[in-house]
Image: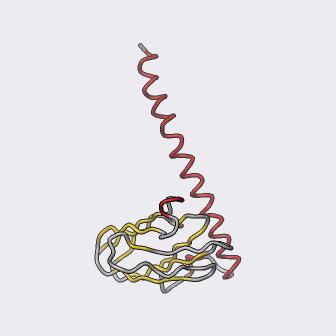
Amino acid sequence: MKTQRLLPAALSLLLAAPALAADEDAATICAEAEERYVELFGQPSASVEDAEVVLMYKYNFCPAELTVKAGTTVRWLNVDKRTSHSVLLKDGSEPESDRLFPEETVDLTFLTPGPLDYLCGPHWETQNMIGMITVEP
């Protein structure tokens, strides 16, 4: 009887393991992205006062999910050494940004509350480079 109860729990843990590993990988990559930002600019990205910063690094958006108040500007910054990225809102409300080469940025100001999925034009299919902004009133 105990074996029957443990089996579903064990299966649940096994199925969750890849997701947990992916979260750890993303956390490690985002920590590296922040280190790269500090190396480039001499201060943490959180010290930027005029925007919320999303770093683009190793085919990830860091953070991948961000919640902001309406009227907030979000600045995407490529901290990769060689790869270019772009920002494309899935709802089509803005055209895809130009390719951002290392140390280049694009800013978008969000006025309308709600969730907005976005992606990197060249890397969303092959690298699953996708993010989400939630705009609160």
Quadrant in which residue 94 is drawn: bottom left
Quadrant of the drawing holding the C terminus:
bottom left
Q: Is residue 68 left or right of residue 59?
A: left
Q: Residue furthest bottom?
A: 50
Residue appearing at x 45%, y 33% in the figure = 12
| Front-most of residues 101 and 16 | 101
Above or below residue 9? Residue 55 is: below
Give x and y (percent) for residue 69: 35, 76
Q: In this view, does 90 lie to the left or right of 6?
A: left
Above or below residue 19? Residue 34 is: below
Q: Which residue lies furthest to the right in this view?
A: 39
Quadrant of the drawing holding the N terminus:
top left
| Front-most of residues 13 and 96 | 96
Residue appearing at x 63%, y 78% in the figure = 102
Give x and y (percent) for residue 132: 41, 66
**Colour mapping:** secondary structure
State how many labels appear: 0
Residue appearing at x 50%, y 75% in the figure = 86
Q: Residue furthest top?
A: 1
Residue appearing at x 62%, y 81% in the figure = 103
Above or below residue 88? Residue 123 is: above
Give x and y (percent) for residue 32: 66, 65
